[in-house]
Image (tube, rainbow, N blue to C red):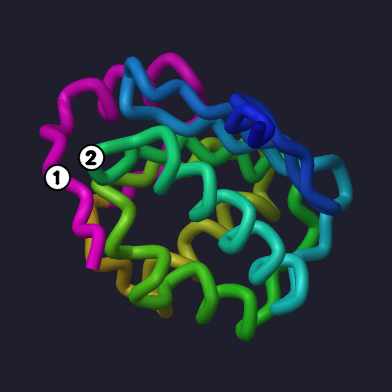
Amino acid sequence: MTDPVPRKIETSVSFVEFLPSENLILWKYKLGSVVTKSEALEEVEAISKVILELFDCRVKLMIDISGVKKVTREARAVFSSPQTTEMTQATALVMGSRVSTVIANLFISLSRPQHATRIFHSSDEAKDWLDAQESSKLSRG
């Protein structure tokens, strides 16, 4: 018998909760997180596995980056890779500090996500925006 698919996971730098009924993933970085290529690959692998098990549509991500201290260029490349973008419908980046705002603006301007991406200072505003985004089927390659 296989283990049930988790609804929550913890990576070395974040906590992730999966809400398939809302087609939503809540992703919160731990305080002081430094995200390198290694951590980014860990997250993408763990999250992708759960997405393929639980979701039939491209997902909406609400990512709280207020705890992030730094994201490397290599990590940003992982997050903007085809493996990641093909599973994502929309991304709402929630931040609470100047550092996280700079990181979010840098990610958007340098990575040029292939899906709708916006910056918010409140989870409620981010959730409202994500709710308004239409879902599309997840390509299973």
Crowding around mark 2 (Cα neighbors within 10 Å: few <14, some 14 to 19, many 20+) is some
Rendered-image quadrant of the N terminus: top right
Q: Is residue 140 above or below residue 141?
A: above
Asked whether, in this view, residue 68 is left or right of residue 80, the answer is: right
Amino acid at circle 1: Lys
State if disc 1 and disc 2 touch (CB < 8 Å).
yes
Q: Secondary structure at mark 1?
A: loop
Q: Is residue 140 magenta?
A: yes
Looking at the picture, how far across and down is residue 97, in whole percent?
Answer: 68, 41
Looking at the picture, how far across and down is residue 140, in whole percent?
Answer: 25, 59
Q: Secondary structure at mark 2?
A: loop
Asked whether, in this view, residue 2 is left or right of residue 89, the answer is: right
The residue drawn where x is 56% and y is 49% is 47
Q: How many marks?
A: 2
The tag on residue 137 is 1
Rendered-image quadrant of the C terminus: bottom left
Q: Which residues are magenta?
A: 117-141
The tag on residue 10 is none
Q: Is residue 43 above or below residue 15?
A: below
Q: Is residue 108 magenta?
A: no
Label 2 to label 1: alpha-carbon separation? 4 Å
Who is closer to the viewer here, 24 or 113? 24
The residue drawn where x is 43% and y is 15% is 124
Amino acid at circle 2: Cys
The residue drawn where x is 49% and y is 21% is 123
Sequence-first tag of 2 and 1? 2
Q: Is residue 122 above or below residue 48?
A: above
The tag on residue 57 is 2
The residue drawn where x is 69% and y is 54% is 99
Who is closer to the viewer here, 74 or 41? 41
